[in-house]
Amino acid sequence: MFRPDVLAGKSILITGGGTGLGRAMALAFADLGAQVFLVGRREEPLQRTCNDVRASGGHAAWATADVRDFAAVEQAVKKAWSSFGRLDAVVNNAAGNFLARTERLSPNAFAAIVGIVLHGTFHCTLAAGRRWIAAGQPGHVLNILTSYATTGSPFVVPSACAKAGVLALTRSLAVEWARYRIRVNAIAPGPFPTPGAWEQLVPSAEFEQRWQQAIPAGRFGRHEELTALAAFLLSEPADYITGACVAIDGGLTACSPGGFQMLLDAPAEFWQTLEARHRTSRQRAPESDNDAE
């Protein structure tokens, strides 16, 4: 649906860019002519995705960074700028999430999610925004939220709080930075299957089926649908759009809160099994880049 060069000449930084939706966006943007710079905590998936972009004739570079660390983010943004000579857009996609009964959350678990989602988004936005303003250069920030950012959701309270904060950040900076020709928008996806997120958020086949049946469209999202929306918002035809949050969820939030309320009647055994799985997952991979829902 796009001209093959609709993103030509644009350099786009994507956090959480090595896996899941971040990887899908990187490949799609590169196919449309963009240069992509990928940021994440793990070297191997970043390198693999960059190699795939280059194999298709695109341009890609990467840097490892924990988005919770502003100094590390500043270094990554500096490297992106030097790699391509400029930076036109930042896609804040890095996230973390898991299902949990809130009364059993530790303060550290809450802080970890808020740190990645809210603080990380602010860090990347600030690092790029300061450079754009100093250079008198226009820019675009695209934040990947979730369908329950506006409604809240049980059992994912850290994520809901953090994503709501990112939505407020989106709307606030869209107004404040419009005078600098910096656009700030957001996408609020419903369920889009990715290996990282699905492992944390879909505890059983039965739950997956119930979740799918709750969506008016009767299915989960496809990666190419989200990447098409993101590409449009980053393109010149969308230049008058700022401060927007576009839902892409098959009608989920139009008919329900859009979160995990279907688990309110889950038995204690369900949660015990899920908590055991989380412990095993943390032991196996204590640091992983998770995508938005």
Image (tube, grey):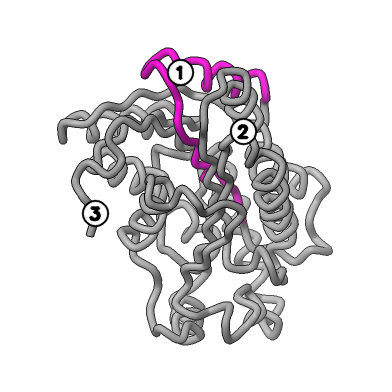
Residue at 67% across, 70% down: 271
Disc sitting over residue 2 in the figure:
3
Residue at 72% across, 41% down: 176
**Number of the front mark, 1 or 2:** 2
Compute the Cα span from label 3 to label 2: 28 Å
Check the image and report above or below for 70 versus 281.
Answer: above
Disc sitting over residue 11 in the figure:
none
In this picture, residue 28 sits left or right of residue 216: left
Check the image and report above or below for 200 versus 42.
Answer: below
Residue type, label 2: Tyr
Segment colored magenta:
70-97
Residue type, label 1: Trp
Check the image and report above or below for 229 versus 51.
Answer: below
Q: Name the residue under label 2.
A: 180
Q: Mark 1 points at which residue?
A: 81
Q: Earlier in the sequence, mark 1 or mark 2?
A: 1
Assign a secondary structure to mark 1.
Answer: helix
Task: Name the image quarter holding the N terminus.
Answer: bottom left
Compute the Cα span from label 1 to label 3: 26 Å
Spot occupied by residue 97 in the image (x, y as percentages of width and height): 61, 54
In this picture, residue 248 sits left or right of residue 154: left
Q: How crowded is mark 3: few (under 14 residues within 10 Å), some or many (20 or more)?
A: few
Q: How crowded is mark 2: few (under 14 residues within 10 Å), some or many (20 or more)?
A: some
Magenta span contains residue 138: no
**Number of the front mark, 1 or 3:** 3
Q: Earlier in the sequence, mark 3 or mark 2?
A: 3
Assign a secondary structure to mark 2.
Answer: helix
